[in-house]
Image (spheres, coloured by chain):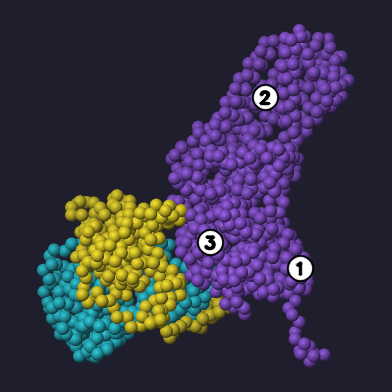
Amino acid sequence: MRIVVPMKAVPDLVEEIEITADGTGIDREYLKFVLNEWDDQALEEALLVKEATGAEVVALGLGSDPDIDASLYTAIAKGADRAVRLTGAGEVPDTATRARAVAGYLRDHPADLVITGVQAPDDLDGQLPATLGALLGHPHVSVVVSVALVTDPPEPPAVRVRQEFAGGRAAELVVDLPAVIGLQAARQAPRYAPISRIRQVMAAGGIEQVDPGLAPGSATGASGLAVRRMHAPEKTSHAQMLTGSADEVAGQIVDLLRSRGLVKG
Amino acid sequence: MSSNVMVLVEAEAGGVTDATVELIGKARELATAWGGAVEAVVLGPGEVGTGLGGADTVVRVEHPGLATYLPEAYENTLAELLVTRSPRLLMLANSTVGLDLGAALAVAWDAELVAYVVGLQTEGTTAVATAQILGGKILAEVGMAAERGVVTVVPGSFPAALGRVAGEPELVTVDAPGSLGSLRMRLERLVTPEGGDVDITAAPMLVSVGRGVGSADNIELAQEMADYLGATVSSSRPVVDAGWMPKSRQVGKSGLTVTPRAYLAFGISGAPEHLEGMRDSELIIACNTDENAPIFDVAHYGTTTDLFELLPALTGRLGG
Amino acid sequence: MPEHPGAVALEVTRTVFQGIDLAGKSLFYVVSTAVILVFLYGWYRRVDKYRQGRPAGRGATFWRAVRGKADVGPAGRRDTRTVGTLAASSTIARRDTSAGIAHFFIFWGFIVAFVATVILTIDHDIVGPVSNALFGHTDSFFHGPFFVVYSLTVDTFGFAFLVALVSMAVRRGIRRPFKLGYGRAQNPDQGYSRGRYVAGDWVFLGLLIAILVTAYLLTGARILSQGDPWFTALTPFGRTVAEIYSGLGMTPAAAATVHTYLWWVHAALALAFVAYIPYSKAMHILVDGVNLLASDRRATRDLPGPVPGADHAGYQQISDFTWKELLDLDACTKCGRCHDVCPARTAGAPLSPRDLILDLRQWVDTAEHGITLLDRESRPDATGPLAPAGEVPIAGGVIPAATLWACTTCMACVDICPVGVEHVPLIVELRRSLVEEGQMDPTLQTAMKNLATQGNSFGKSARMRARWTKGLDFTVTDARKEPVTYLWYVGDYASFDDRLQENSRLLARLLHDAGVSFGILYEDEWNSGNDVRRAGEEGLYEMLAEHNIAALAAAGFQEIFTTDPHTLNTLRNEYPARGASYTVWHYTELLAHLLDTGALPVRPLGRTVTYHDPCYLARYNEVVQAPRRILTALGCELVEMPRNRANTFCCGAGGGRIWMDDSMLTERPSENRIREAALLDVGYFVVSCPKDMTMYSDAAKTTGNDATLTVLDITRLVDEALVRPAPSVGAMDVLT
Ligand SMILES: Cc1cc2nc3c(=O)[nH]c(=O)nc-3n(C[C@H](O)[C@H](O)[C@H](O)COP(=O)(O)OP(=O)(O)OC[C@H]3O[C@@H](n4cnc5c(N)ncnc54)[C@H](O)[C@@H]3O)c2cc1C
Ligand code: SF4
Ligand code: SF4
């Protein structure tokens, strides 16, 4: 079985995010990019499936994502069998373009299962799993918290996934392969890859570079969204800040609660 | 093409979800401006819940295969409805269902999609959507140029009151697409939340901890303070994912929605998915060392004191 | 072999094998030969084990030590030891004088007894037979003045030896200091027994005492049987025994018989002891001298790099250890000093450096089908160190992960170990294995990930590093753009922790006022990696160090100073190995200098304070004078902490502990320390490390001492004492 894990580098949210001069995008120049945390979860789940079944795990990234190589090498250090960097999707591809590049790759290198993060913090034009599922014509399920290969009738190949809803409800679905899964959280916290191993992997190189050519997509989506303006939310209703030592702040909080009758005395 | 706005109705045990009512309210506004109608799509057999008074038409597909939510079945059905009824805009809640269907329908229907929408306005015959990205740090305003589009709306963005109007929508029943007979996925089992634990939705006061607490053991600090306060401890999602708290304590989109008299958030950044579950609390006090954390935009009071200092200080103040 | 018939009473000597017939002698020689073989076999097995270790690079250290040459540390303390150290038992006398004195006499008593035996053997078994063969008569030098001196020496040293042994027995059996208790810090689920350790101790002590007691009983009997000639006055203790015998009414003839019996008992005990040495605690006689002379404190300051050519990180098998480390394991005498001082153990963490060494020893022994007779632990199930070879990993199995993670790398154990065991590098090696397996606290993982992406453990944007300078009314020079005299390596805590930023600004202002030319690296300063390295994340350390070294190379400065003792350690001691050698100061050294030169004019504060020596400053790098000079210059009365300077007690934050959960502790080390200070009746607890500031402010609160004890950075004291420029003349005019 072959599992492909498309991964995306996104701005580290600890950074102060600035807007470009024309006001329609974020200024990527000085931003630190990190792996989308849900893709990290997806990779972990894929590795768990690999451990259970011996599947091959391929980490997939777009060459235009800043620092994506670091994430790809990390994926290998964690146990992915291969890493592939796709080119030819333009400078700052949106989800639609990204999905077309991944679909292009999968057309030539089919996968039984695609597991990717349920969302990314900046996928304004939609999330990758559903877009990709629709482009490929594969069944797809999002907000998944566990994936396991169905072993009891072996044919046709399928996975059993758990999909979550609000209020703690969930559903267990059996999905025929090939399928696309949007992962919310892996069964266990993503493993740690020691830097020395990552560096060894890096020194060995071995990211395959592929220019897949974009799969045909929706005609409308292809032109991208017309972003008129990006801005930080105006702080219309910013909290009133309590200051002072920890003890003073604690005192003010207790007073607030007391004035509402929530603390007696 | 019509000037109609189509809304997918999601229901839960008590009837139509609040998020759906919000959508219908907003759809009403848009449709009025465009001179179109609001079409509420109800999938599956059974009673149509109350709460759809704001819609002009209720479009029903009563196939038994749609009785419970199944991503592929819903997607195929909606895809066909979009083609046959060609609305100008399809509105979905940014729920599990929205995450499953929104982007896929946009591809299938060849439409534009804006995700994480928190604001919508008309502009002539099109819409302008405001979306919240990067963990709530940035708002993006998108002019929806095409004449057909899909939006997934962050629950809580629009007042539900607009949708909660009386009305007698026209009922239209439509046949299910043939493809429902050859789906590639099936539902095996529905899982209901594990009982036994406290019900955080009923607690008058919640002390909620986020990833900022760092480890399972530190939750003790919050628990101790909550004990003195007479409050219940809840948490954000990552705390549950890490196994530090049971799922039944999770507040937010994929957890529970709470409206306690006081919600005290410690080390929670205030991602939209979390805010969704607690923004209507009567009093929100947030503690986060990052002064720019989005949680401060919904909190009434905030402090950048370190939670590891504040929690013991509070415990002390409360008599610990 | 003819004796000296008739000469007994006249000639000044004594008879070897007195009263033992030929058959007896033959038996003795046969048994002795067997004993020597048993001894050699045991010793061979040990040496064979050490030979499985990697090269340690300590051969040169050892030979220099043998030649009496020690390497001296930054402030004059020795990093390596010499034969002199060994001869004086001085490492044992450190902070335990009576044990040191006792060991001194045991050590020399043993050597004298050993040399005496060698002399006898040479005279009796070499000189005698050889002269007999060559010249036809049996020569001997064992008479006359030589014999007198010999007797006196053996008799007095023997007695001191005996007294020292008895005092050790009293200490162990009656006084029972805490450190000699064998309770484990980490309790295995199924329980354990260390009864055999206790048995081993008593067999060792008991055998030696019995050998000495029989020696005196024997000597007394001999003297009495010889008719107590005049020269036995020079065997005073032996003669006393003879006098007691005769006082009890023993005749010389009876004494001769008693002598024969005692001779056999004594010989049997002595031979048994020799055979027993390599199979017991007594092996320390052979191992520990070598171990001490090969030890080097620098290996803790500047940790060893990854095992060359290894396909895994850290230690996983015996051959990963160096011979010195394998020797370390056998060298431990269970003296418990490290167990006593360890802050992790004190705090109730499941780590005792002593147990760590003993467990590893046991594990190696088990794997090697060990030959230790007693001196081992037993457990109902063969778990942990008793698990069969290859069944459990060393890190995380033989030694539980929680044990390894509990270490603060404070170096107290290495510092106090009398036999030169180096625990810290070993612990770090084992942590490297844990990191390789990803077995670490989630909080530690987060810190490491933050360090890898943003160069700081706070997970803040690297671009925010110099944000603390915003509140200053001058711009701190960017040393990347403009050359400065001093590059200030600020460190993560002083840069990012908002409780400490004010302190950083204070220091900046002081230096600015004093006209010091200094600058910082802004966002190009990354965490120096000292604690990352000690947490076992060697790859991340390398990455951080490479980045910082490149940043330093691109900046213009003459010397470095840092606010953080941990940073000081790695910049001063570890970066040079990566080709970056700079003069690195601690800010207290710079401040002391500025006060000395008058660049910072101060008025006396007249406060009574105590001062906490940071481990990485005082114990690692011997910076103890500068902060004290500052306090003197500020007119503060310093009441020393009971544990001060190199004997300081860790705050608990080192070695990456600050990133880990400490809820398993019963008393945090910092709280222990604050309670120590609270007894001193001082108002101020002065610190000189940013981490200390956070650790101790917190501990003062949690122990309820914050009302009476103010935790202060030394910078703040300097600031308060500073005489700022006088008010403007105009204002003065109005007043007068
Ligand atoms: C489909 C879907 C459903 C989701 N459902 C939910 C949901 O139901 N509930 C939910 O919560 N999330 C949900 N999420 C996840 C959500 O996107 C965020 O990832 C999550 O809410 C972040 O949790 P957090 O605020 O605890 O962690 P973080 O965003 O990591 O924030 C931690 C915060 O702690 C602060 N902090 C750190 N140390 C301290 C300290 N010592 N003192 C004070 N503050 C400190 C930091 O400044 C930071 O702001 C969902 C996501 C998806 C895609
Ligand atoms: S370095 Fe300190 S904490 Fe670690 S084992 Fe030694 S004494 Fe204990
Ligand atoms: S390691 Fe050293 S200090 Fe610790 S018990 Fe052994 S000999 Fe004593």
Cβ–Cβ under 8 Å for marks 1 and 3: no
Crowd rating for badge 1 (residues with CA inside 10 Å; few <14, some 14–19, many 20+)? few
| 2 and 3 marks in contact (CB < 8 Å) | no
- Residue C256: image quadrant is top right
- Identify which residue, B171 or C247, lies in the foreground: B171
The kind of secondary structure element at disc 1 is loop
Rounded to the nearest angstrom, the CA distance separating label 1 from label 2 is 69 Å
Q: Nearer the viewer, mark 1 or mark 3?
A: 3
Q: Residue at the spot x=26%, y=85% of the render? A: B127
Chain ID at mark 2: C
Chain A shade: yellow
Q: Is residue C233 left or right of residue C402?
A: right
**Which disc number belongs to residue C269?**
2
Query: Is residue A175 among the parts visible in the rendering?
Result: no
Under mark 1, the amino acid is: Thr
Label 2 or label 3, whichever lies nearer to me, is: 3
- Where residue B74 appears, as percent x and y from the top left, is 19, 71
Same chain under badges 2 and 3? The reply is yes
